[in-house]
Amino acid sequence: MLTVDMPIGVLDSGVGGLSVLKCLRSMLPAEDFIYLGDTARTPYGPRSEEEVRAFVEQMLCFFDEKKVKLVVVACNTLTVLGVETLKKQHKFDIIGMSKGAALVLAASKKKI
């Protein structure tokens, strides 16, 4: 059961999402946050979609264990995968960087 006192997870493939976390903390000072930056496996760009999806699933399971109420995907690469396809059986909602994803998709010839 999700409750308002649960933390918000912030997910990135590295440290770039720290700027998103800074904005979130400024806008939502009463909230607790858990930041997870996958610096061990960055960059994600040259990796296959299947490999990146496996990384994301591992990180989302971590957030399940931490009992977050929401996850903000602060990574355009991950958002382009389709935030709605990442949810699976997780109880929390997942929000992506939709503006950045829209820009990337508009410029992409593959349209993954």
Image: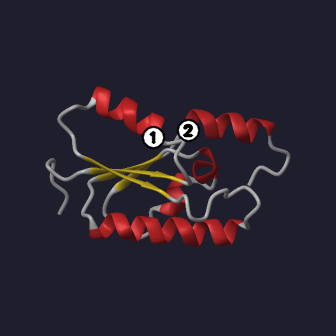
User: Residue at horizontal 54%, vertical 61%?
Assistant: 85
User: How far across and down, in percent of the image, does residue 31 sit?
Assistant: 21, 40
Q: Check contact, mark 1 vs mark 2: CB within 8 A.
A: no
Residue for badge 1: 18
Residue at the outermost front position: 40
User: How far across and down, in percent of the image, does residue 81 sit?
Assistant: 63, 56
In which quarter of the view is residue 43 placed?
A: bottom right
Q: Quadrant of the N terminus?
A: bottom left
C-alpha span from label 1 to label 2: 17 Å
| Residue 15 vertical position relative to residue 106 in the rendered view, above or below | below
* Between 49 and 29, the one nearer to me in the picture: 29
Q: Secondary structure at mark 1?
A: helix
Q: Residues within 10 Å of mark 2 (few under 14, many from 20)?
A: some
Which numbered disc covers residue 98?
Answer: 2
Amino acid under label 1? Leu
Residue 31 lies left or right of residue 105; in this view the side is left
In this view of the protein, can residue 90 be seen by the observer? no
User: Residue at horizontal 64%, vertical 50%?
Assistant: 77
Amino acid under label 2? Ser
Residue 88 lies left or right of residue 32; in this view the side is right
Residue 65 lies left or right of residue 75; in this view the side is left
Residue at the outermost right position: 109
Question: In the rendered structure, which disc, 1 or 2, sits on the residue that comes first in sequence?
Answer: 1
In which quarter of the view is residue 47 placed?
A: bottom right
Residue at the outermost top position: 27
User: Residue at horizontal 67%, vertical 71%?
Assistant: 50
Q: Secondary structure at mark 2?
A: helix
User: How far across and down, in percent of the image, does residue 8 sit?
Assistant: 29, 49
User: Residue at horizontal 72%, vertical 41%?
Assistant: 105
